[in-house]
Every structure is written in C-alpha cells, then in structure tokens.
Amino acid sequence: MNIHPTVQEAATLFIQAGKQVFLVGGAVRDLLQGRAAKDWDIATDARPEEVVALFHGRKTGSSGRSFVVPTGIKHGTVTVHYKGLSMEVTTFRSESGYSDGRHPDKVEFGVSIETDLSRRDFTMNAAAYQLPGGPLVDPFGGRNDIKSRLIRCVGNAAERFAEDGLRPLRALRFASQLDFTIDEQTLAAIPGAIPLTAKVAAERMREEIDKMIASSKPSTALLLMEKTGLLNLLIPELAECRGVKQDRLKGTGFHRFDVLDHSLLACDFAARSGAPQEVRLAVLFHDIGKPPAAHIDDGGLRTFHRHEKFSVERTREILLRFRYSNAVIEKVCHLVGEHMFHYEDSWSNAAVRRFVIRVGEENLPDLYALRRADTYGQAAAEPSPQLLVPLINRVEETLAESRALSLKDLAISGKDLITAGIPPGKQMGIILNELLEAALEDPALNSREKLLEIAEKINKRYEN
Ligand code: ATP
Ligand code: MG
C-alpha cells in the first residue's frame, strides 16, 4: 500500500491519542487497484471536536500550523489541513430512518468501523484499511468487487437507493470514472428508485453530472442514465435527441448517427482530448435544440435551420436547473450559440475580425475544441489535423495586422466628430459604426485624418 507519508504521520497522531484511524473511500479503491491515491478520506472513532483539538493550530515545524475546517460537522466530517495535505476525517457513525429519501432521520456516533462501513453505498466504498499497516476491514467483499471492477450495493440495492436517491447517480458516475460495470441487481433497482432520485437537491445532482462529464468517458454514465430512465428525469431535452435522424450535413456529406449518439461521441472525444469542463458541457448540449428545430424542407430532407438558437435556450434552462454558476452558464451558452460558424477563404478581413469580435479572442481555443469534437461526432472518425488550420492562420494574420476591434480602438471619438461639425445623435452612432467597418476591412484607415475624411463623406451623404 503506497500511502502518503503525511497521511501516515497524521495517523500516528490519532493513534498516540488512543484513537483508531482507517483509510476509506476512493483511496482504498485506488490502492487496491495498485494506483496512487489522490483523495484521502479518513474514518476514526475520534469525535469531530477531538479531531479539532488534535489538529487545529498544531505547529508543523517551521512551515506553519495545521488547521481544521468544519466542512460537514453535522455528519461528523471535518477537513484537516496538515502539512500541505487535506484529509476528510469522518467519525464512525450509523444512520437510520431516511424517511425523506435524502437524509437519515437519526445519526449516531460512537459505533464500530464495521457498523460505519455498513451505511456506505457500494461494496467498493465499504472497505477500510487500518492505519498504519492494516488489516483491511472488508465485510462486504469490496476487494473482490474492485478486482472484478464491479459496482454493487452494500446489501439490498432497492433499500439502499430508497435511503438516498443520489446513490443511483453515484453508481453511474463511478461507472464512467472508474470504467467499472454495474452489478445486474444494482442496475435493475435504479428505475424503481427514480421517484426518490427526483427529490434529491439540484446541487447534489450537479456534482454527479459534473463528475460524469469530467471523466474520461462520459457516455458510459449518460447511456446508463438513458437506459435506466434517469436521463429522462434529469435532462429530458437530451433524451429527446434519441432517434432524431440527421439527413444532411452542410457541405461535407452525411451524419451517421442520431443527435444523441452524435452528442455522446463528441463529448467523449472532448473528454479524451482533455477539454475543459465548459467545453465538454457545450459539446454535450450543442445540438440539443435540434428536436424543436427539425423541419422537412422542400426536397424532403430533414434540416435544423438555426437550431443553435434553440440549443442556447435549452442549454441555459438545463444549467439553471442544476444551479450552475453564471460564469459557467454564460460561457457554455456562448460556445453553443457560436458553434455553427463556416469559415471560407473568401471571408474578407472585416469578416474575420467580426468573427473574432463576436466569439471573443479568449474563447477561440474553446470554440475550436468544440468544432473538433463536433466533427469527430459526425462519423466517429478523428478530424483531420488540418481542419481548422486555415481559419487559425487567417485569424492570426488578421490580428497581427491590427488589433483594432471595437469603437474604443478607433483613432477618433464622437467628440472629434462634433468638433468637425457633425451633429451628435443617432446619425453619429451610425457614422462611428461605419468607420469601424472601414477600419476592420482596412486597418490602414484607422488614423485621425483618414477617418475624419470618411466621416465627412458619410455625413454629406446624409445631408443630401
Ligand atoms: P471520489 O472522492 O473519488 O468521488 P469517494 O468514494 O471517495 O470517491 P466521496 O464522495 O469522497 O467518494 O465519499 C467518501 C465515502 O463516503 C465513499 O467511498 C462512501 O463510502 C461514502 N459515501 C459518500 N456518499 C455516500 C452516499 N450518498 N451514500 C452512502 N455512502 C456514501
Ligand atoms: Mg473521496
């Protein structure tokens, strides 16, 4: 077991205080799979206040002091920050009641590690390694299930799901994260638990969705969500994309997949390429407006004219429903709304600059990542490395020539125009925008003299 020396050092402090200390959760899973652990969950018989007394303000050499944050003190969880490492420390507890399908009615501290393990969700999460050197306490066969890469409820799956409706989502999320299979009986119990999952707080659902999408293969969880009915509960807009066939693809040929499979393939590609979370979300939702936009054209082909508008609307609704931050919502919706660009070499310099203005220079890499994923999802084939090179080069060239992209970058202002005898008002706004257009087309025009000259010409046109 490759346990971090700082964790062992912290464990020694528990043991010296006469307390038991166990490694639990993800770290045990990782270590049993022979992987390095990153996330340190600790279980102990020490009460939260005893953990605080043991660690809060403790001197840690010349480097400083450790401290304790009461992250989930009600449930007996505190976070210990010790020598640069953070550990979630939870007091052994038993839970009972769960009349609301979300929280236990009664939590009791001061039980044994075995009792504590029996409240945990899956066998792979219900094995504990006693520090410093073992043994492994494994009353539910977690070690074997980890070996067989199996997600299985501790005890009766339906009962465990009835206690906490989040667990079905956790099972699916772990399947994506760990590339494990869900045990047949556990999976079979999910549809029946849907009314309970429906009661779970949106934020808890979001955490699971985020972890699914942050995994290296989101489609594993999302397809299981579809199969069990959870997709219809959480993101019915995405479920509606199943069976939406795509007859035609502008320019290049045919889509091979329906909108849902296309979106999942694209999302997996984005995940494999290490795209940031906002890009993955945008990829997953970029075509979610296709069902409402579907239209049969005169030639009998199904088209999705301006579907990106519907996609933005639906994406916003979904992200709001799960209480994503405004920053995430704006970013994802912006990418979704811009995903339909079609660059051609015939674009004028002004068109290239307008594209950069609209997308925002800082968003370009993300929009390109979205396009690569979208292209992958059309035929499940690696996009050519050349796919975006002409556009990228063109943007680079155009920006190298001039970075004047907005009214404030113009060499003259409204005041200058007034001095030159052009009356303030609506007409002046129009003139300034025409000047910007001219400067976008030809940056050499962005000088006081030249712009004034053009402004006077435009003004004359209005006077006539
Ligand atoms: P990761 O941190 O990689 O998401 P983890 O297994 O450590 O995985 P945590 O959410 O950190 O998951 O929870 C730590 C442990 O607490 C789990 O391994 C599990 O034993 C228990 N646990 C967490 N949430 C639940 C839940 N909803 N129901 C039952 N047990 C849970
Ligand atoms: Mg953990």
Image (spheres, helix red, strand yellow):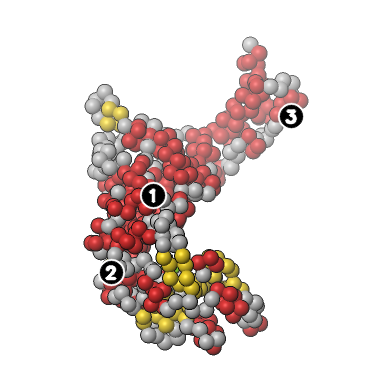
Work out whether residue 248 or residue 321 is closer to the camera in this orientation and state it.
321
Amino acid type at circle 3 is Lys
Q: Is mark 1 within 8 Å of ligand 1?
A: no
Mark 2: few/some/many CA within 10 Å (<14, 14-19, 20+): some
Mark 1: few/some/many CA within 10 Å (<14, 14-19, 20+): some
**Which one is closest to the eye, mark 1 or mark 2?**
1
Disc 1 element: loop
* Res 231 seen here: yes
Mark pair 2, 3: CA separation: 71 Å
Horizontal relation, residue 351 to residue 376: left or right: right
The earlier-in-sequence mark between 2 and 3 is 2
The earlier-in-sequence mark between 1 and 2 is 2
Name the residue that disc number 3 marks. Answer: 415
| Residue at screen point 59% across, 72% down | 68
| Residue at screen point 51% across, 84% down | 19
Q: Quadrant of the C terminus?
A: top right
Amino acid type at circle 2 is Arg
Disc 2 element: loop
Disc 3 element: helix
Name the residue that disc number 1 marks. Answer: 198
Horizontal relation, residue 416 to residue 202: left or right: right
Name the residue that disc number 2 marks. Answer: 149
Work out whether residue 185 or residue 23 is closer to the camera in this orientation and state it.
185
Amino acid type at circle 1 is Ala
**In the rendered view, would you say 426 is above or below 353?**
above
* Res 210 seen here: no
Mark pair 3, 1: CA separation: 59 Å
The earlier-in-sequence mark between 3 and 1 is 1
Question: Residue 459 falls in which quadrant of the image?
Answer: top right
